[in-house]
Amino acid sequence: MKTTGMVRRVDGLGRIVIPKEIRKVLKIKENEQVEINVQDDCIVLNRYSDLDEYDISLTNLIECIEDIYNIDFLLTNLNSIVLTSNKYKEYQGVELSPYLNSILDERREVKEHIPAKLSLNKDKEDVKVSYVIKTIIKNGDTVGLLILLSDTNLENNDLKLLDLMNNFLDKYLE
């Protein structure tokens, strides 16, 4: 285990402030959830996301939509792309681009009905697609992004698929 040389006092309510330098290095944002574990005689903190613990039903739904409608979905947590349709598997686990981070921070919805360049990751080349990006919010907290991608122009029915996925995620994350 790496030591930082930083020491913090536990207050009367049992709280400890995680130093800003450590939060910055680990990319822990304000109001982000942290999982607390005990390992031997150590307290271990991990970044936590409800979207990191998905099961096969969510994967199957994304694959079925891809097969039937030729539409691709990406699902992110606050830091990386956690689930993709087959065409975008190379992006699974990669860190979000600054563009996607700005959408998360501002809780925006973005629509590009005709193919345009989209930056998914700062280290990979932009993709040219039509897309809709929707911020996923659970109990008032931002938890990730739902991204719909298509090689062709998006139609109203495609947007209905996004609503279907969003409604499914609302129930899935309960």
Image (spheres, helix red, strand yellow):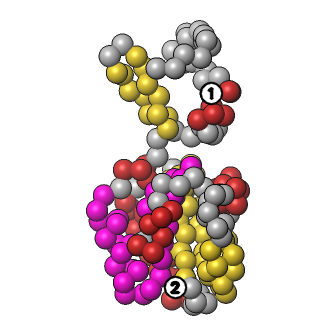
* Residue 132 image offset from top left, x and y in percent: 60, 75
Question: What is the quadrant of the C terminus in the image?
Answer: bottom left
Residue 8 appears in the picture as rendered: yes
* Residue 89 image offset from top left, x and y in percent: 44, 66
* Residue 25 image offset from top left, x and y in percent: 63, 33
| Mark 1 neighbour density, 10 Å: few (under 14) some (14–19) many (20 or more) | few
The residue under label 2 is 158
Q: Circles 2 and 1: CB distance less than 8 Å?
A: no
Type of amino acid at the residue the image marks with label 1: Ile
Q: Is residue 61 magenta?
A: yes
| Disc number for residue 22 | 1
Nearer to us in this view, 105 or 173: 105
Tell me which residue sits at (53%, 75%) in the image. Answer: 148
Q: Is residue 152 above or below residue 139?
A: below
Tell me which residue sits at (43%, 62%) in the image. Answer: 83
Q: Is residue 83 magenta?
A: yes
Earlier residue among tags 2 and 1: 1
**Does residue 25 appear to the left or right of 88 in the view shown?**
right
In front of the other: label 2 or label 1? Answer: 1
Secondary structure of the residue carrying numbered label 2: helix
Q: Which residues are magenta?
A: 55-84
Type of amino acid at the residue the image marks with label 2: Asp
Q: Is residue 24 above or below residue 145?
A: above
Tell me which residue sits at (46%, 20%) in the image. Answer: 1
